[in-house]
Amino acid sequence: MKKFLLFTFALALSATAFGQNSWRIELNSNGGASTGDFAGSDQINDVNGFSEYAYTGDLTTKYFIGKLGIGIRFYTAGFSRDHETYKTALTSSLTSTSTTSYLERRAGYLAYGSQIGVSYDFELAPNIGLEPSFYIGYMELLIPGDELVYSRNFTTRHYATDVASAQGVAFTPGIRLNWQVHKIVGISFNSQFMFTSMEEQTIEGVDYTALELDPVVALRSYQPQAFTVGIGVYFVIPTKKNQD
């Protein structure tokens, strides 16, 4: 990763030596399906995320050296958690003897971060280009807490965990079809695959009744992963040299 960062930085420093340079500012919105273990929902374990779908939004700024783009991206992401399936699996994992339980509905997983990357805009026709890219960077993942009421050995129990967070690296290869509808404005249709390498998270909480209180400590290794498609708008800002 350090070599990739140094390579990108070196390209940026040498950008002024090239002609036909421009800035591009992009706003993108994507949605799609969670994949891999993060979509697993067969049982409560250390990797299953019970996530069905994902969405992302980002603000990306690129500097183009001819057709080569060097960019920095700030993004947010959300990942669903299947409420009913998760409730059933969580209740079962606590060896519940009841057929009913109540899990307070919470938002799914939230994430945010920044990435740097490179892209190349291949011209397919006048004002139309195909742009593959690869971005890498930081992700902060927020894991929702639980608030479950269930029964074990004919005793009503409460299971509660705190919101947890984890940090890691997000990798995002993607491809865009760009259509420049005006000299400085364009729209794009894009797809991308996000996968991550995250640190192990510690989930803490309590499992209690009116008469006893048991601490809860569990280790999780969630690795968000998703394939998404979407649309974006971008603005082209020629450099002063190109405007002259």
Image: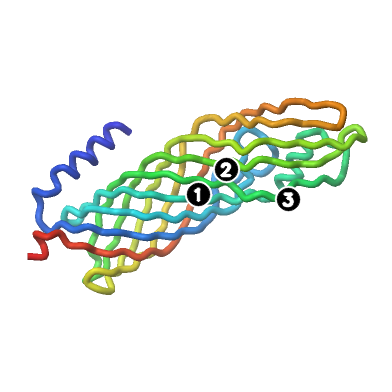
- Please, what is the three-letter code of the amino acid marked with disc 1? Ala
- First in sequence: mark 3 or mark 1? 3
- First in sequence: mark 2 or mark 3? 2
Residue drawn at (87%, 28%), measured in percent from left and top?
Answer: 211
Is residue 101 rendered to the left or right of residue 181?
right
Q: Quadrant of the C terminus?
A: bottom left
Q: Nearer the viewer, residue 199 or 122?
A: 199
The answer to whether marks 1 and 2 mark residues whose Cβ atoms lie closer than 8 Å is yes
- Residue 241, quarter of the rendered image: bottom left
**87 over 168 or under it: above or below:** below
User: Where residue 200 appears, x then y in whole percent?
Assistant: 54, 29
Q: Please give the residue where the numbered disc 1 appears in the rendered image.
A: 226
Mark linked to residue 39: none
- Please, what is the three-letter code of the amino acid marked with disc 2? Phe
- First in sequence: mark 1 or mark 2? 2
Residue drawn at (73%, 30%), measured in percent from left and top?
Answer: 206
